[in-house]
Image (cartoon, helix red, strand yellow):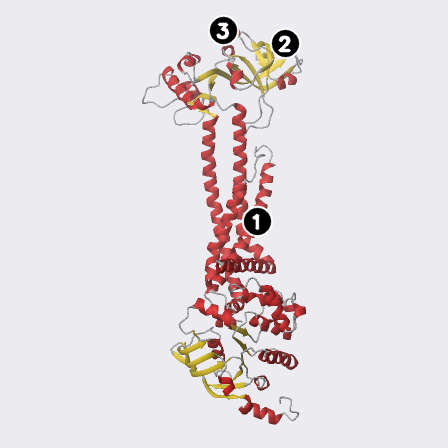
Amino acid sequence: MRAVIGAAIAFFQLFYQSVYLALGQIWTNKTRSILTTIGIVIGVASVTAVIAALSGLKAKVLTMVETFGTNTIFITPRQPGKGRLRQPPDWWTFRFLPEHFDGMLEHCPSVARFSRVGGVGRRTIRAGERSVDNVEVLGIEPAYHQIESRPVVLGRTFSVIDDEQLRSVCLIDPKLRDELRLDRDCIGQSIRIGHHAFVIVGVIEPQPRLEVGESSEEYYEVFIPFRTIFKLGEPGIMAFAASKEASILEEAQAEIRFFLRRTRNIKPTELDTFRVESLQSALETFNKIALIVTLVAGGIVGISLLVGGVGIMNIMLVSVSERTREIGLRKAVGAKKSAILTQFLIESVVLCFIGGFIGIGFGQLLTMAIANIPKVELDMAYIPLWAIAISFGFAGSVGIFFGMFPAIKAARLDPIEALRHE
Amino acid sequence: MTAERAEKLIIRLQNVTKIYKIGVERIRALDGIDLQVRENEYAAVMGPSGSGKSTLMNVLGCLDRATEGFYELDGQDTTKMSDAALARIRNERIGFVFQTFELLGQLSALKNVEMPLIYSRNSWRSRRKRAKSVLQRVGLAGRLKHKPNQLSGGEKQRVAIARALVCNPSILLADEPTGNLDSKTSEGILALFDQLHREGQTIVIVTHEEHVACHAKRIIHMRDGRIYSDLPIEQDFVYKTAVQNDTRGKLS
């Protein structure tokens, strides 16, 4: 037992002395060591920065999901096998009609509520002498407020009568109200959308500004009853729905999909002409993309670590050849092959750890830089602890892998020839 | 001689031959060496370059293996030992002193002396104490924290001797220990060897300088890989010549 403890302490001393010697060696050859570790520095800095950016993006997306509700479902028309519809003919072919959603609540037991939303694009709004361009005009149903967490803060919501009689009433967002210089309590005042006059019946909660990739330019909204929107033109229709519980979100999506396939007369062999999406499925998509980005970045980082490792190997070979006499002496005073091997491996690992340390420092700077790029929405970027652990793990592995050959070379030196070496 | 015979046998070489192959040529660096060194002997190995004295030193120090023959150190047969076992023998039983000191420049005198203990077992407890006491023994108690480049040549060699002694070796092997020192400093180092010899240390020293060899109690002459003279100092021709030439009688 005592011998075991003695051996363990002897190893620790060898370890400690090797680290001490390695640091001394690195300090003596500062410039050379720094240049050598650059490959590791770049590798570690880029891996931490990429992970930080993805972590920040993920945190952002999660915040968004929480803000918009975890049980919200988005229903949009899509051309089968293609992305979002852009071209009018497709829009026309696959557009939703209001009656597609008739009876949805009765047939979809997991769905708590839904609102059709009709859009006619951006219009110019006038009030007296003032006018504001590019205002989004949306036709909505009362359930919209609850699904999107945007209650009416002043005045009233639309009633069934507003909707059925196609009344020209509207809800306005506070920013637009201020832009149009309307009174704070603007209820009963009127605005004009194109040639139509609308009476303001309420003020709606402003939109939380969280959408990823949203431009920072001002964005205004006016809401009118869903059916009233048809007075302004043929609208593009989508729908927002909410499941009764977040846990049955997928059931709700499946029910909606089944229901809409029937109301849109899609044959069993045909593909869906719409999408039923939730932020959770968006999150899954995001995770897939994040994984791909991580793998690609990982590949690039792997290459730079490989290059860095070759640099480490090169410098360790130089070190072994410069210190041949030292190796000879150590062998003469009783160092076994394993002791010499350990010493040089530790030196190479210490070198790599120093590279890793500097790399994480640079990674932190890069992360701070990324977080401060305006309009990129990466302000939540941070380096998670596990990324630091992985970086050091990789740096250490590179040290061991690429330090092995020089260390073996050192361990195999013949002491007599090593001591004779000039 | 009879009193010496009673001493313990440290080194026993029997018909040791070392053959180097250089290309197709075979060089007999050692050719049938028989040698015995007893405890507390102080022997000098002399010979011109190429006589095989360095090879003998390497074999004695377990840095090199004999091609043929038998080498027993402290009663242990070293001829069939593994590399690791030989490393342990070098660590525990042999102290080397080199012409060029071979100190590690980054380490202080104390750390240089401690180094062999790091490779030994069970010496961790008293490591620093032993290193300090052995540095004191060689007269460097006040130089513990100095790095080699802050020490004089003589001090460097004293550190190297302390390092050789720190594991309490059975034998101290010195290869031209004064080769890089001026004559005054050399005398100091040789006085230290004399002192160690009086304290009971077994010493074998390789040199081609007569005044160095004359400090030993026994001189072994080599030529062409063979020992051709191995006598106590009083009977050795080199010593006799030196005494004759030294009118002031400094060496007597």
Q: Residue at the location (54% across, 51% down)?
A: A353
Dot 1 or dot 2, earlier in sequence: 2
The reply, left or right, for residue A122 in relation to residue A272 is: right
| Mark nearer the N terminus (2 vs 3) | 3
Q: Are marks 2 and 3 on the same chain?
A: yes
Q: Nearer the viewer, residue B231 or B1?
A: B1
Q: Please name whichever residue, A361 or A276, is drawn nearer the observer in this view of the structure.
A: A361
Residues beneath discs 1 and 2 located on the same chain: yes
> Amino acid type of disc 2?
Gln
Q: Quick one: A118 or A61, which is closer to the camera?
A: A61
Q: Position of residue A200 (x, y in %)?
A: 60, 10
Residue A385 drawn above or below residue A275:
below
Task: Kindly identify which numbered label has been placed on residue A164.
Answer: 3
Q: Which residue is mark 2?
A: A189
Q: Identify the amino acid type marked 3.
A: Glu
Label 2 to label 3: alpha-carbon separation: 22 Å
Provide the chain ID for the residue under circle 1: A
Q: Which is in the foreground here, disc 1 or disc 2?
A: 1
Q: Which residue is mark 1?
A: A357
Q: Is residue A85 visible?
A: no
